[in-house]
Amino acid sequence: MSQVTTPNKSQKQNFHKLQKRIRHNTGKAIADFKMIEEGDKVMVCLSGGKDSYTMLDVLLHMQKVAPISFEIVAVNLDQKQPGFPEHVLPTYLQSLGIDYEIVEEDTYSIVVDKIEAGKTTCSLCSRLRRGILYSTATRLGATKIALGHHRDDMLETLFLNMFHGGKLKSMPPKLVSDDGKQMVIRPLAYCAEKDILQYSNALEFPIIPCNLCGSQENLQRKMIKGMLQEWDQKYPSRIESMFKAIQNVAPSHLADKQLYDFESLKTQDGPFKDGDIGFDQPEFNPLSSEKHVTKTTNISQIQAIDVTNL
């Protein structure tokens, strides 16, 4: 018979540091992008994976300590995949004593019918799921739809779009749905996947695997994830630097003529903002094992939530 291991003092301290970091990063993202406002009803999309469990856990904490009042309703979409453990999420959510709804829609049969055997089903499955969640949010009167994507998801999407889509495009922390009616937020936008994994393991969330449909993880995304993980091991600060880059965009130094008016550029006698500095000596500050261009970030506008006490 296995014995339950009691966490020692050091393990408890490490967990509290991890918890504080995740709560702080989530609170800062919410504040930076004004994701949640007074009176919001936030529909937390719960898949049964580590990310959405962590998001729900942190948002429930935010609901208690934030200086604003907002509602939370957890929603899971049961897509009728063979072997889906229907009891897991209701049991967990009932133990929390929160409002929740399980939406049952047989998207599995549609995906199997439309996608050729052996091909990845993730894309179509995701689109069908998103449409159902949008309609559910409307029916429930939710003002925000919270998804569990984290910092690593955003960087993976950036590289996928560059390598395979010819676009400099990632997942934004906050966006409006294509029909203009829903506001989607990603509260974990500043959180690292490795932190979320450690947090999920520590709290022993009842994880439901995302392989019930029998499909393989998108190979391209898997390769990008492996690339980023290798970089993170060899160059610990590289991921942080890349994430800062998508928050610090210089349109004048790219090549999108729709985004920047290159045709109207003219020389002038005085200094030109964002002008070419090719003859200037660049300034670098060392971060860990690599060097990165740094820029001061103004966080004085954080108002929605006081992140210092999270």
Image (tube, grey):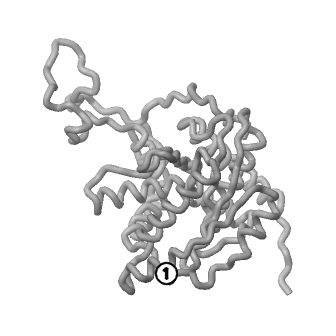
Horizontal side of residue 110 vs 82, given as left or right = left
* Residue 206: image location, x then y, percent: 71, 71
Frontmost residue, 293 versus 148: 148
Total marks drawn?
1
Q: Is residue 289 visible?
A: no
Q: Is residue 257 visible?
A: yes
Residue 79 lies, in percent from the top left, at: 57, 74
**Which residue sits at x=16%, y=25%?**
265
Please name the residue shown 77% across and 53% down the image.
13
Q: Is residue 48 above or below residue 29?
A: below
**How many residues crowd around disc 1 within 10 Å: few (fewer than 14), some, or many (20 or more)?**
few
Which quadrant of the rendered structure holds the C terminus?
top right
Q: Secondary structure at mark 1?
A: helix
Q: With 251 as the anchor, is 3 left or right in this view?
A: right
- Image position of 187 with respect to 301: above or below: below
114 over 152 or under it: above or below: below
Q: Quadrant of residue 155?
A: bottom left
Image check: 255 left or right of 67? Answer: left
The residue type indicated by label 1 comes to: Ser
Q: Tell me which residue sits at (21%, 41%) in the image.
A: 255
Outermost residue, top side: 269
Question: Residue at 69% across / 66% down in the picture?
Answer: 201
**Quadrant into which the N terminus falls:** bottom right
- Horizontal and vertical percent for residue 264? 15, 26
Residue 111, image x and y in percent?
A: 44, 77
**Residue denoted by label 1:** 109
Using the rendered view, name the quadrant where residue 221 is placed. Answer: bottom left
